[in-house]
Amino acid sequence: MRNRFCKTPLWECNDELVRVAQGEKPADLVIRHASLVCVTTHEILPDTDIAVACGRVAYLGLGEHTAEHCIGPDTQVVDATGLYAAPGLMDSHIHIESAMVGPSEYARAVVPHGTCAILADPHEAANVCGLPGVRAMWDDAARTPLKTMLTTPSCVPAVTGVEDTGASITAADVADSMAWDSVVGLGEMMNFPGILAGEKNALDEVRETLRADRVVTGHFPSPDRDRGLSAYVAAGVSSCHESGSFDEVLAKLRLGMWVQLRQGSAWLNLPGYLPQLVASGVDTRHCLLCSDDNHPHTLVDEGHMDRILRTAVELGLDPVTALQMATINCAEYFGLAHDLGSVTPGKCADIVLLDDLESFRARKVFIDGELVAEDGRALFSVAPYVWPDFMTHTMNLGLAPTAETFRIPVDLPDGTARVRAMAIDPGDTLTRNVVVEVPVAGGALQADPAHDVLKVAVFDRHHSAAGTHAFGFVTGFGIHGALAQTVSHDAHNLLVMGDNDEDMALAAATLAECGGGEVAVADGKVLALVELPVCGLMSTERVEVVAEKVGAARRAWEQMGCTMPSPFMTMGVMSLACVPELRLTNRGYVNCLTFEMEPLLVS
């Protein structure tokens, strides 16, 4: 597959690389005396020189050999004594929108941490604004050196027939997108029930991707590790980031899948299976690292792929193996290894100079041989992106939220009623389908904050004429007041949760007024607000500003009584109708094991 992300295609410059390697022409850049992390042989090669021309590696000076013959009067020479030279880091699966900023600002946040390429699935924006919204995002991305590669969103909506989204993507749309320069594969095929049931559009999306010689990335959280998993892989889905245990990881590896080991802001999966994976001695060549979703404060305060590498090494993974998972393994899976993933002759000069293989702190970052970040600071800047109007006017509720809007009427006497609820465990995408008792007063169901049972409502925000919404209950958050957000995977409808109707109404009205985002309310006061006017998902401000607002929201959560890490991110998947067990959409409860609608009341 031709890589359109490099400064110069190899076929245009191989003659010049030959001349530079032999000392017949000076290099543009020579990095000297580095300890090279050789991901092709799992070695660290001391005192290595790296000569670069046309944005690609022309020569490696190994052992007693040096690149002195490649240095001319205009060659930039970088002394890397005491530093490790590693391939530019790659995130194998990421949703940019979860960082609450656009692609150019995302690049400014992650490149200083050594990230040179991301494989992004923008199905959040696609669910709101379709492929035109995706094109606008990639126009923004093209203004930065970060290699922002697109996996076309596959599941818009995530599961058909259970929710209302702002757009849809068909197999014909997928086929058209495969001709885009930015596309390297199909985004996560979350509709695994559709694949297993032989649903035509789901299978046709996979077929069109395979026909274009691209990979199909997956999402298979089902406990079925026998017929269902085999069928899913046989359909052409070749990777998965949704694994919660070592047994799941091993089952997928044994069937030939590439497993994306995930450590995001809320989905902290590595501790759950990586130590066992290391102890097992299983070959990890099909293991990749990914973040999936990162909040802005994670990127600003902790880092990106460097953070995941630190965690992996702390959990017992060999650092060179960890780097393989974030470089060459990723490049090989996506069919990009002929250009990316290793510091070897002919490859793109995406190189990060690291202080050590414990902190993975990036001292200098080169993309296509150009210094783009140094000592934690991006050396490139872009003007604020002007988003199209259709992406900044997406709050169409069809109603003005009031306290009465959140009343859940029932034809029952005062007392108690048994209802279904979503039980949330911190740091996990899964929910449990439980039955709880809630008070009934004045012909309406009530929250029961004394037992940590909160009301939840989901409103269709894409179709103003409809104004549809549904109610449910949740346990596990422990808050007083209300939280609301338009970041609610994957339809990104308006999601409101709270222990009283008045605060829930204020939270909903606040987001309707500002165009979407995240808000915390208690006792009639807005405690924190993160405005996200672009698709209700992204800010127009700097990532540091957004991170500070998210930090204020985090402090508000604690003030409201919540001890859960990243509750907004955990809350945001309560509508994700493709992950077990129970979810709430604007149409009602969805049983994500049977994919049937479930009633709120339990007789």
Image: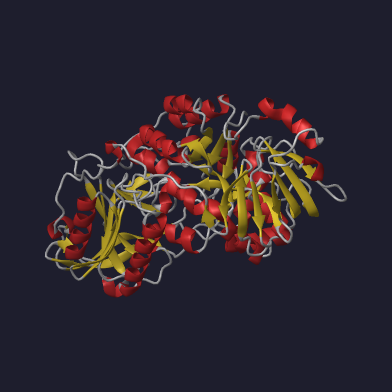
In this view of the protein, can residue 433 be seen by the observer? no
Q: Position of residue 326 (x, y in %)?
A: 63, 50
- The quadrant the N terminus occupies is top right
- Please provide percent x and percent y for residue 72: 74, 41
| Front in this rendered view, residue 481 or 521 | 521
Instruction: Name, please, the residue furthest toward the right.
Output: 64
Residue at coordinates 56% horizontally, 25% vertically from top-left?
Answer: 212
- Establish if 69 lies above or below 36: above
Examine the image and state in which quarter residue 507 appears: bottom left
Q: Residue at x 58, y 46 (%)?
A: 116
156 or 100: which is nearer to us?
A: 100
Left or right for 441, reference 236: left
452 vs 24, left or right, is left
In the picture, residue 422 is in which quadrant?
A: bottom left
* Coloration of the structure image: secondary structure
- Taking depth in this image into account, of 169 and 339 the one nearest to the observer is 339
Indicate left or right for 79 with 383 as reference: right
For this rendering, which residue is in front, 478 or 8?
8
Q: Position of residue 428 (x, y in %)?
A: 47, 60
- Asked if residue 437 shows in the view, the reply is yes
Against 22, residue 429 (above or below) is below
Q: Give percent across and percent down for residue 297.
A: 43, 61
Image quadrant in which the C terminus is located: bottom left
Left or right: residue 81 compared with residue 449: right
The residue drawn where x is 35% and y is 51% is: 488
